[in-house]
Image (cartoon, helix red, strand yellow):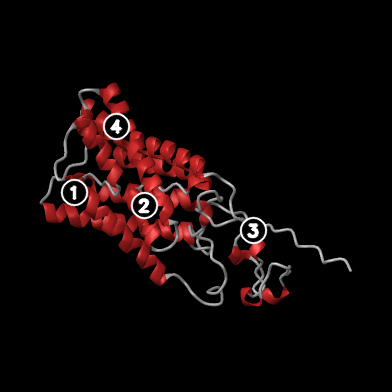
Amino acid sequence: MEEPATPNSSATATPGTPGAPLFNSLRVDSLPHDRKRMPRCANCLPASRGMCFTEFPRPDISLTRKLGAEFVGTFILIFGATAAPIVNQKYNGAETLIGNAACAGLAVMVVILSTGHISGAHLNPSLTIAFALLRHFPWVHVPAYILAQVSASISASFALKAIFHPFLSGGVTVPSVPTAQAFSIEFVITFNLLFVFTAVATDTRAVGELAGIAVGATVILNILIAGPLSGGSMNPVRTLGPAVAAGNYKQIWIYLVAPTAGAIAGATAYTLVKLKGEDEQIPQRSFRR
């Protein structure tokens, strides 16, 4: 007897998962609500409620390619986000705060759109750690991702130093307010960023196609608020690379601790408020491997 043909899977892997498209043309929430009528195959289990495991294929992208994409993406982000305040310093405020915020937000947006389907476009050690803690990302890849991000940040910063010397100090994020205030603002803006990022990258009901725009807009908003106070870092490597290149480590611990704590809190907050219901037992598309 011939075995029934296995349905051709059309859904992609987790949005934002390294190796999987960040933006999907077919989303789980666009499928029929009556899942009993969905096609089944030999790989389906009764507990899967009609959802085939073959609809979530394991992406076939090597860790080397993911790290390469993460390095290039972080390089572009740090170069763009740091160059704007340096130009602002060199040319007597030509960029303004709005220009600084726009450069950072646009850099985040274009990198997510171009590398999100390869590495997940973390670009931020705090994000990587937060996603690993919430089981959206494998811990075994965390050291390699952070190494790629740190090395890209330092490389971009020394490239800027070679181009704009001696104006690199303008790109270093240092607080202009008391320590407690700087810590608080960095915590809150990173909370905002990770709340949005977690929503568009891990929840199938979010508008994943607009992930780059949503995250980039959040970065712009945060820098407009926090730029004059703390520099609006939200990212340890945004501060670490320029600090190493310029030799300025003033209050650097704030930019290592506050964004990480804020990222964990923001990602956890969205996980707690995320809609649950009939989709609760369905394999979710996330950074989990």
Left or right: 202, with 165 as reference point: right
Residue 241 visible here: yes
The three-letter code of the residue at mark 3 reads Ala
Distance between the alpha carbons at the discs numbered 3 and 2? 28 Å
Q: Are marks 3 and 2 in contact (CB under 8 Å)?
A: no
Q: In the rendering, at what x and y percent does residue 236 appear? A: 28, 46
The three-letter code of the residue at mark 2 reads Thr
Q: Which numbered mark, 3 or 1, is in the foreground of this view?
A: 1
Q: In the rendering, at what x and y percent does residue 94 appear? A: 26, 30
Q: Which numbered mark, 3 or 2, is in the foreground of this view?
A: 3
In terms of secondary structure, where does tag 4 sit?
helix
User: Which of disc 1 and disc 3 is earlier in sequence?
Assistant: 3
Q: Which numbered mark, 2 or 1, is in the foreground of this view?
A: 1
Distance between the alpha carbons at the discs numbered 2 and 1? 23 Å
Label 3 Cα crowd, 10 Å radius (few <14 / some 14-19 / many 20+): some
Label 2 belongs to which residue? Answer: 218
User: Which of disc 1 and disc 4 is earlier in sequence?
Assistant: 4
Relative to residue 25, is residue 231 depicted above or below?
above
In terms of secondary structure, where does tag 3 sit?
loop
- Can you tell which mark lies on residue 253? 1
Distance between the alpha carbons at the discs numbered 3 and 1? 43 Å
Give the residue displayed 22% in from the left and 34% down from the top.
244
Q: In the rendering, at what x and y percent does residue 269 appear? A: 35, 67
Give the residue displayed 10% in from the left and 51% down from the top.
178
